[in-house]
Image (spheres, helix red, strand yellow):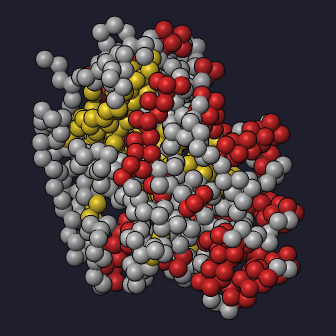
Amino acid sequence: MRRQVFTEVINYKMALLLLGAVIAMPTWADEKQSMGIDFTVSQDNVPEKSQDYSPFVHQSYPDRVYWGDSHLHTSYSWDAGLVGNTLGPDEAYRFAKGERVIASSGQPVKLVRPLDWLVVADHAESLGVAVLIDRSDPAILKSEVGRATHDFYRKGDIYKAFETWGFNVIVKGENPLTDPALTRNVWEEITEHAENHNDPGKFTAFIGYEWSSAPAGNNLHRVVVLRDDAEQANKVLPFPAYDSSDPEDLWKWMAAYEQKTGGQVLAIPHNGNLSNGVMFSVQTLDGKPIDKDYAERRARWEPLYEITQMKGDGEAHPVLSPNDEFADYENWDRGNWNGSKKQPEMLQYEYARGALKVGLLMEEKLGVNPYKFGLIGATDSHTSLATTREDNYFGKVSVMEPGPERFDTQIVPDPENVGTGTYEFETVASGLQGIWSRENSREALWDALKRKETYATTGSRMTVRVFAGWDYSESDVLRPDFAMTGYLGGVPMGGDLRSAPDGKSPRLMIRSLRDPDGANLDRIQVIKGWLDESGKLQEKIYDVACSDDREINANHRCEKVVGSTVNIEKAIYTNGIGDALLMAFWEDPDFDANARVFYYVRVLEIPTPRWTTYDAAFYNVSLPKGVSAEQQDRAYTSPIWYTP
């Protein structure tokens, strides 16, 4: 009897070759459409059959994963520069490219390996205020708020400077920076830094910013990423939440940008866990039911969601997924920015898995899925340093960079003392984003973002690839031309399957390779969500590959946990357990061709010390109470959807 699930561990060097090995494809776009598969790679890139001896002459589909951070703040953000960050975009890019830099706290810091790309996403609100204050710019000194903030900053009282500006400008809305010429000067400095560091083929510096809407303290923030260069970006100014806190107005700005410049832009929501049920609501911000027009615009402008970052992991929650033993990973679930307490009914509209399921229900009703998003990870660091390794974590903001006392500071306030406060030790050393692309350029990487061929990790750089189709065989996952086979017979992460052939179920081919500088792998899981025939939303988790020859039981779970090699006192671990490479072939055993379905893959590493454990060992201090001493980094791929 043919197995539905299997694992294979092979020589590590050979694994590297297998994951990258691809050969040229024949023309097959028409065939894929007839098979009920949406064409994901541009038809313009599909080569004709060739008689060339070299099989790689006409290779045209994504063959590499490129690592980066789509959400990094520098001293040009008010809540970074006014709380001790002295590093601007130039230092942020140099650090991402692998250079050793000196952090704002005076400590040397370096990445284990360079990143391939970066989005500097400073807040559009009060853009560059700390830099202008540091320069004693006359425009700042004209206002009472500006002078007071400037004087506190110059005296070295950064907390008072931050408090003064934040209360008067962010809370009360008394913004002295209303001169577009001043904003333009700062914006053009930011775009110039991006141009200086953009090096097609070697490193991509995207131009972007953050729109930081938080009506009533509910987080609706978006990172806006341009496909374009400074010449186009400088034709506009970033759209601040001062002008509107409604995402629909941001979409209008995006449409106007594209019309004015001929460029392209997308937005990435983040931290729905701090939105108190607003991020993925079934209503618009003004309380009207979402209609088809809204759903189409949201799907058009927001193809991705930032599922994990420093302010909590947003994949799943134990209340929503009680049968998922890994759903309790680094949840921030106490309240919003104003300290309003979380209610259980809010959770399904905050977490990615819940939103993906709600999207199926909306599509059934409207014919359009507003929450059909790919998954990415980013840092949201305000230190200018994209650090995500547990042993190299420089914190959320510069005043909380490594030191023996950084466990005690509060990040999310609790003004009413109702239990909504969140502390520095609860921040997460997360996350990173892998993009599958042909080349390292703004255009190629942005296009991959748009088509959702991208995935999130909580900080590790494990390689993950998944394809879904109707006719893969178990042996296909072992092929050296795995990628070509995947594209030829199906779709990659972010793709769509439609109209199942009679008697067939979706078949997934999955490969994952450990971070060469990190931990071995524990398991591969397929997360399935669907809308059943009674109109109820369902989910199920299937372990499809388990390391160390562990069997999978009748409940579709590894027969036992992977174990742990972590020495908490010394903050070390070994790769004596787990596997370097896991591969799986899986066919949905419970498929209903009439149901709307999504599948995404979650890959878990073996346990490693949490960053707080590294800190405790390094500084010889006690571990903080309330967080685990060890954790399991993980990857989340963009879903693949099936639509009847």
Query: Which residue sits at x=31%, y=13%?
Result: 504
Q: Quadrant of the N terminus?
A: top left
Residue at horizontal 49%, vertical 46%? 376
Residue 583 image-quadrant placement: top left
In the rendered image, residue 461, in percent from the top left (x then y), is placed at 41, 51
Q: Quadrant of the C terminus?
A: top left
Say if residue 64 shows up in the picture. Answer: no
Number of numbered labels in the structure image: 0
In this picture, residue 251 sits left or right of residue 385: right
Residue farthest to the front, as pictured:
287
Q: Position of residue 354 (x, y in %)?
A: 40, 41
Quarter residue 172 falls in = bottom right
620 on left or right of 157: left
Residue 46 is left or right of residue 601, and the answer is: right
State the residue at coordinates (66%, 49%): 246
Tell me, yes or no, if residue 257 can be seen here: yes
Residue at the farthest bottom position: 155
| Residue at left offset 60%, top offset 46% | 285
Q: Is residue 634 above or below residue 159?
A: above
Q: Where 392 falls versus 28 (above or below)?
A: below
Name the side, left or right, on which 87 lies relative to 457: right
- Measuring from the top left, give residue 265's x and y in whole percent: 68, 42
Q: Where does the image place residue 525, in percent across and percent down from the top left?
A: 28, 39
Front position in the image: 605 or 165:
165
